[in-house]
């Protein structure tokens, strides 16, 4: 397939490389100069999208997605695909999909989970929103870049699934970290805490797979001085998107709101920026109850 790939950052570059390695003809564009084996670079987003059967975007936020979409939708031929894999607000995803639909394109919002490791290994999970025909066009590409793709519903459904998942993730990480910090103060050994919780009803992905305590459980960013991994500021971005979405549909999300406020404080007032989101554990460790 002739593929255009716009946004060749930490995630986009390995995703584009995997498509090229699988034999697709990939033209890429990024505003910062990058070079990528087997990916021809264009000088603008429109140039990267022209004459392509599917155009994929992997961009930082909804405002940038909207501006890139305005540039590329007019040059993509009717019947071709526009697949946005960025994590953006549901409103931007729906607005861009509407414009793409109006131009006769097959639009999919398909944010991912799995991080940079998953992008490199081609093991991402895609959560997709759009028509059945649009999903069918994109699915073979998801199979190359990932190991699972779920068609969640109409446009915006992929973003909705992503932010709901990450709202759970943020709140669960905080719960796991504060429980470890409490266990420390109660004199409980961390390994014993892991042995019990990981096989009891408090178990979760954050405890069992991505344990925030160094030296405990499978290897995780905690074992690498909390180098991300999944950076606290990216967690904050997704939590803010969840609260924006909750506000737009009047949903009551008190745990999501509390998680957003804590990560905001951690990233903007403390030392969270640039650290893995599991570095909440050393944060709780050093604090007192009313601090
Ligand atoms: P990144 O900042 O590394 O990459 C974004 C790229 O977009 C950059 O290279 C930037 O130069 C480029 N860009 C910005 N404006 C542009 C424009 N107008 N035209 C072309 N290129 C432009 O970010 P990333 O980590 O690759 O994340 C990309 C998206 O994936 C984000 O929405 C993020 O929330 C999401 N995501 C990231 C992770 C992760 O672990 N990094 C995991 C899941 C989802």
Image (cartoon, helix red, strand yellow):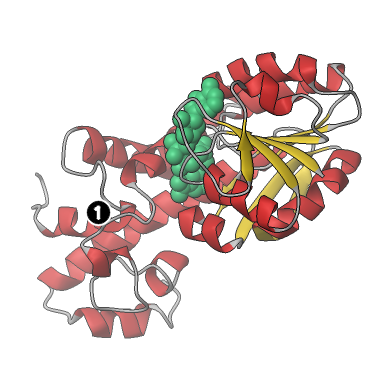
Regarding residue 99, the answer to whether it shows in the image is no
> Which quarter shows the C terminus?
top left
The location of residue 98, given as percent across then percent down, is 78, 20
Identified at 83% across, 35% down, the residue is 53
Is 86 located above or below residue 191 in the figure? above
Is 53 located above or below residue 211 in the figure? above
The part of the image, by quadrant, that contains residue 18 is bottom right
Is 215 located above or below residue 123 in the figure? below
The location of residue 215, given as percent across then percent down, is 24, 78
Regarding residue 21, the answer to whether it shows in the image is yes
Horizontal side of 281 relative to 69 (left or right) equals left
Identified at 55% across, 42% down, the residue is 163
Identified at 36% across, 43% down, the residue is 259
Horizontal side of 253 relative to 182 (left or right) equals right
The residue at which mark 1 appears reads as 280
The location of residue 290, given as percent across then percent down, is 10, 45
The location of residue 208, given as percent across then percent down, is 42, 74
């Amino acid at each position: 397939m002739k593929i255009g790939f716009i946004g060749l950052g930490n995630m986009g570059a390995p995703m584009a490389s995997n498509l090229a390695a699988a034999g697709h003809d990939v033209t890429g564009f990024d505003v910062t100069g990058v070079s990528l084996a087997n990916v021809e670079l264009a000088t603008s987003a429109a140039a990267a999208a022209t004459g392509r059967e599917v155009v994929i975007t992997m961009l930082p936020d909804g405002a940038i997605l909207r501006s890139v979409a305005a540039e590329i939708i007019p040059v993509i031929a009717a019947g071709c695909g526009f697949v946005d894999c960025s994590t953006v607000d549901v409103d931007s995803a729906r607005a861009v999909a509407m414009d793409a639909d109006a131009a006769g394109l097959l639009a999919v919002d398909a944010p991912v989970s799995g991080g940079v490791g998953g992008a490199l290994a081609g093991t991402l999970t895609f959560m997709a929103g759009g028509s059945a025909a649009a999903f069918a066009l994109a699915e073979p590409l998801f199979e190359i870049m990932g190991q699972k793709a779920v068609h969640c519903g109409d446009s915006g459904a992929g973003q909705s699934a992503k932010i709901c998942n990450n709202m759970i993730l943020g709140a669960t990480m905080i719960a796991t970290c504060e429980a470890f910090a409490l266990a420390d103060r109660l004199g409980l050994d961390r390994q014993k805490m892991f042995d019990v919780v990981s096989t009891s009803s408090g178990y979760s992905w954050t405890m069992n797979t991505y344990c925030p305590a160094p030296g405990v459980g499978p290897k995780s960013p905690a074992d690498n001085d909390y180098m991300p991994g999944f950076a606290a500021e990216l967690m904050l971005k997704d939590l803010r998107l969840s609260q924006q979405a909750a506000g737009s549909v009047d949903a009551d999300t008190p745990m999501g709101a509390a998680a957003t406020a804590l990560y905001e404080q951690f990233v903007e007032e403390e030392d969270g920026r640039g650290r893995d989101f599991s570095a909440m554990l050393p944060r709780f460790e050093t604090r007192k109850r009313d601090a």
